[in-house]
Amino acid sequence: MTTWPAASIPVFPAGYKPVQSDFTAWIQNTLGFLTDGVVFRARQTSSQALSGASNIMQYQAIDEDPYSGWSATATADQAAHSWLAPYTGLYQVTVTTGYAASANWAETGVLLTGVLTVAAQQGSPGISGPTAGAGGMVTVPMTGGADYVQVSMSIATAESTVITAGSEPSVEIALVSL
């Protein structure tokens, strides 16, 4: 893991008196990251066709991304449809998916910098007709500015995700520990 940069030590020239904005910069902004918890939330607003293999999930509605880590297109630092960690630490990734069921099976996964780290809970309706889904949660260590997360969904037979208000396929990433 990457080590943290040296802490900045404020310098107080003779006659200086701190004001509220100084305390905000020194304390509130610094510790705010630790108290916010969720650092990314996204969901699908349009259905995604899933091939009978592993698929990278695509999210259209970015509900929360205070550190601007999401990229829908590939950049020099990260792959398309991924979230780049702003700080080194442990992050909890929670995934939910839904698809049109036809006695199919599906498995969600979390890719850490392009490598499948874990396959989350598997879902299988076992019957034809109703909406089915898969989801799960995993905690991954990430290096700030270097590691990114993508969500994948492997499915046996080609399907499409189901977009139902309030239960869209989604992902949430929260800081667990630095």
Image (spheres, rainbow, N blue to C red):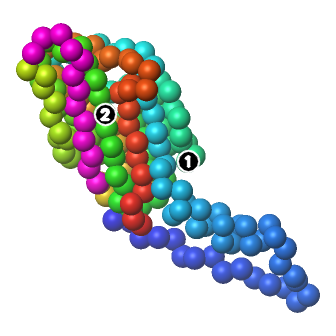
Q: Is residue 68 left or right of residue 168?
A: right
As for residue 136 lying within the magenta part, the answer is yes
Residue 152 is at least partly visible in this image: yes
Which residue is under mark 2? 96
**3 in magenta:** no
Q: Please state the extent of the stretch shown in magenta in the rendering.
A: 127-139
Main secondary structure found in the magenta portion: strand
The answer to whether the residue labelled 1 contacts the one labelled 2, judged by CB atoms less than 8 Å apart, is no
Residue labelled with disc 1: 67
Judge left or right: residue 53 versus residue 96. Answer: left
From the viewer's side, name the closer residue of 148 and 118. Answer: 118
Label 2's element?
strand
Q: CA distance from mark 1 to mark 2?
A: 22 Å
**Residue under the point 37% across and 14% down:** 47
Crowdedness of circle 2 by 10 Å Cα count: few (<14), some, many (20+)? many
- In the rendered image, the quadrant that contains the N terminus is bottom left
Q: Quadrant of residue 122?
A: top left
- The residue nearer to you, when weighing 137 against 1, is 137
- Please indicate whether residue 9 sits to the left or right of residue 124 in the image: right
